[in-house]
Image: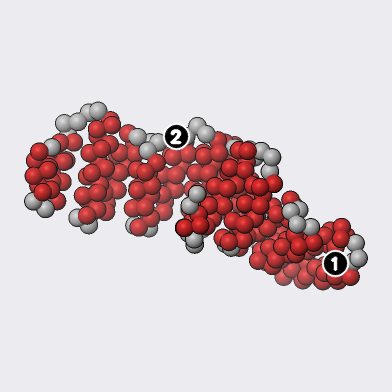
Amino acid sequence: DALVELHEAADRPADALRARQARLAMISEPRVRVHQLRAIAATQESLGNRDGAIAALEEAIALSAEDSPLAEELDRMLETGSLTERRIDLWIRRAAAVDDPHERARRLVHAARLAESLGDATRAIAQLRAALVAHPSDDESVDHLLRLLTPPPTAGSMAEARARVAVHAHAAEHSADAARRIAHLEAIALLEEETIGDTLRAAGTYEAILRVEPGRRGAVVGLARTAARAGDAARLSRALLDEAAATTDAASGDALRVRAADALTATDAERALP
């Protein structure tokens, strides 16, 4: 340790790294090894050796599977290196290491997203099914799975759906009864979402329903689902928070608020903070 400190004080990171590696060979206690491996990874990265840093973090994770900061640091490095396959494996291992069903499902959904980003729908579907085994009522897993299992629209089906939308739109516009107007708007939203595949337009239709009947749960859920599919983080976050406010189940409300914060993280980190 004194030799490491001496090299670091003299700004000799390569020498400090060699000293740490020699020290590591003499350590058997897992907690201490994890500490040394974390320091080795940081030094390797500072020297531009990303592969060495990743190797050190992977060894540390094997000793401390539930160390979230360690896993997040490894995930960051793997992302920087565009090593998405290894990121998927990491999130699957992290899912297996946790007992809480909400958290296990969340990690598997993240693995599914990564698989989808590689164009591997089959693997993504498998992880989403695993998430539903872990947490059968996980809405995010259901929404993602339904989207991946929905076949692409054909020219004929889209033409037919647009004709039906036009009829429903005419009826909604001229109906004097709010319930009937909502029924027609709901039919439009489903056609836009499921058959035409225009999720942004479907989200707008769900918002139109909410202007007629604020707080309608089906429309709030539909808005969240279509906003997620369209990648509209602001709409998704608002809908999830509205759904969380309406639910009577505390655990479900907390999970929805976490999803709302996650949705905003990429675009508005300050608002995502609790």
Residue situated in front as seen by the camera: 152 or 188: 188
Residue 149 shows up from this direction: no
Q: Identity of the amino acid at label 2?
A: Ala
**Helix, strand or loop at mark 2:** loop
Q: Residue 263: percent from the left, percent from the top?
A: 54, 55
Q: Residue at x 47, y 34 (%)?
A: 98
Badge 2 is on which residue?
97
Q: Residue at x 65, y 55 (%)?
A: 239
Q: Identity of the amino acid at label 1?
A: Ala
Drawn side of residue 251 relative to residue 117, left or right: right
* Figure quadrant of the N terminus: top left
Residue situated in front as seen by the camera: 174 or 26: 174
Residue 48 sits above or below residue 89 on the image: below
Badge 1 is on which residue?
172
| Furthest residue in direction top, as rendered | 29
Question: Gap in Å between the C-alphas at discs 2 and 1?
Answer: 51 Å
Q: Are marks 2 and 1 in contact (CB under 8 Å)?
A: no
**Residue 89: quarter of image:** top left
Q: Residue 195: percent from the left, percent from the top?
A: 73, 62
Q: Residue 223: percent from the left, percent from the top?
A: 68, 58
Q: Residues within 10 Å of mark 1 (few under 14, many from 20)?
A: many
Q: Residue 48: percent from the left, percent from the top?
A: 22, 57
